[in-house]
Amino acid sequence: MRGKAIVAGVLAVLICMLKYPHRLFRGFLWAEDGPIFILQAAQHGFRAIWIPYNGYLHAIPRLIAGSWTALSTPDHFIHGFAWTCTAAYFIIAYSLFCLSRRHFPSNWRGHLLSLSVAVLPFAVPQSGEIYFTITNLQWFFSPLLAFLVIDFGVGIDSPIRRWSAMVLALTGPFGVLLLPLAGVLWLSHRSRRLRPLLPYLMGCAMQLVSYTLTHGQETSSRISNYALTKDFPTSAIGEVFVPNSVDFFYQHQGVCLLATCGLLALALLNGIRATKLSLPLFIAAAVLWTIGVIRQGTPDMLIHWYGYGARYLFMPELCFGVGLLFAAVSGVLTIGRLAAITLLCTMVWKAPLPIVPHADDTAVTKESGMFMLRFPPARELQLNTSEGNSAFSLK
């Protein structure tokens, strides 16, 4: 199994490299990498792990930034961060393959499902906001945390699993979002031990305290401001599956939506006959899409997979994708399998349209102990290492 897990990790890395090779080989930093994580790591060291950003704690990006700041110089950051993200992608895919194996049959279909689940987070269509940046590693770690929560009390328990779940729960809001899943699993299987879940629950509690103390609801992000009934079919259903010909979609919107809904119905019917997980996954996709667009706070602008805010479509697309995988591999109806395979192909077959400037906009210059880091969008960070990282300025 270890060899197949390594293959999954290598495939995940190759997919990311094919999408954005310039970021890996030339180095890359994104906006929050500098003023949030690098700057605060230089100022506060590893204590910055307890500083909330956007209402949440971000343990893993803080640990990465703190380690690079303590062990290296700023001229190594642009390559170091990119290769650290690459290592994280390998670990995530490797772990997803291993964790998913116990949930699927031991035949070729089970191995194909595990491999697909491990690779899918890196294959779903995304604009580029989340690739090779420590700021958005949380999105790729979220499915790994989901499997850890599902396995608590019934899988192979170990201190590494417990504390890994706590660290992941302290990285972004996904630990809190998975609390209902943890509650339902525990209530439906009272034989599960609660003790292995305690570190994860501690991480969620700290996130809730952080969010409550530091984040207020903006008027633009109220659910009443968003026209869900009007925009849901085109944004949450149509654009997730329609390929690159976006102009064709808008010119023939009714036909495309009708065809997509028909294929979804066939795939869902096939998935339900194969496993009880398909329907909850499709429902979760719709709910997470709603949470995402409201969190983005853009009631007058659709969230597209190819535009700003695309990261909020990551989890809905992932839930759709896993549900379709079940229908395609484990379903019993041939027409349902074909429908699921068709939708999966249209999801994955979307060349990313980068909205993020290329890596040549990320640069490091050095003069008399002063490092100047430039990164998109239009930010600069100065680190004066000649004074022991005691002087900083952000433009």
Image (tube, rainbow, N blue to C red):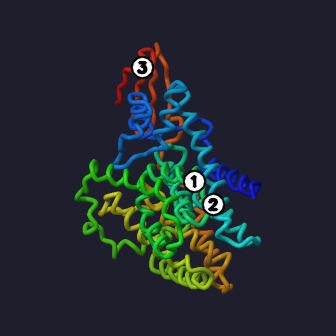
User: Residue at label 3?
Assistant: 384
At 57% from the left edge and 36% from the top edge, which residue is drawn? 27
Q: Residues within 10 Å of mark 1 (few under 14, many from 20)?
A: some
Who is closer to the viewer here, 42 or 15?
42
Q: Position of residue 292 (x, y in %)?
A: 39, 62
Q: Residues within 10 Å of mark 3 (few under 14, many from 20)?
A: some
Among numbered discs 3 and 2, the one appearing first in the sequence: 2
Q: Position of residue 100 (x, y in %)?
A: 64, 64
Instruction: Please state, as top left, top right, bottom left or bottom right, where the N terminus lies in the image.
Output: bottom right
Q: CA distance from mark 3 to mark 2?
A: 48 Å
Q: Position of residue 68 (x, y in %)?
A: 52, 31
Query: What type is the residue that disc 1 sits on?
Result: Arg
Q: Which label was assigned to residue 161?
A: 1
Who is closer to the viewer here, 379 or 108?
108
Q: Secondary structure at mark 1?
A: helix
Q: Residues within 10 Å of mark 2 (few under 14, many from 20)?
A: few
Q: Secondary structure at mark 3?
A: strand
Q: Is residue 281 visible to the viewer in this orientation of the structure?
A: no
At 44% from the left edge and 49% from the top edge, which residue is drawn? 170
Q: Is residue 253 left or right of residue 80?
A: left
Q: CA distance from mark 1 to mark 3?
A: 40 Å
Q: Is residue 65 left or right of residue 297?
A: right
- Image height check: is 275 above or below 147? below
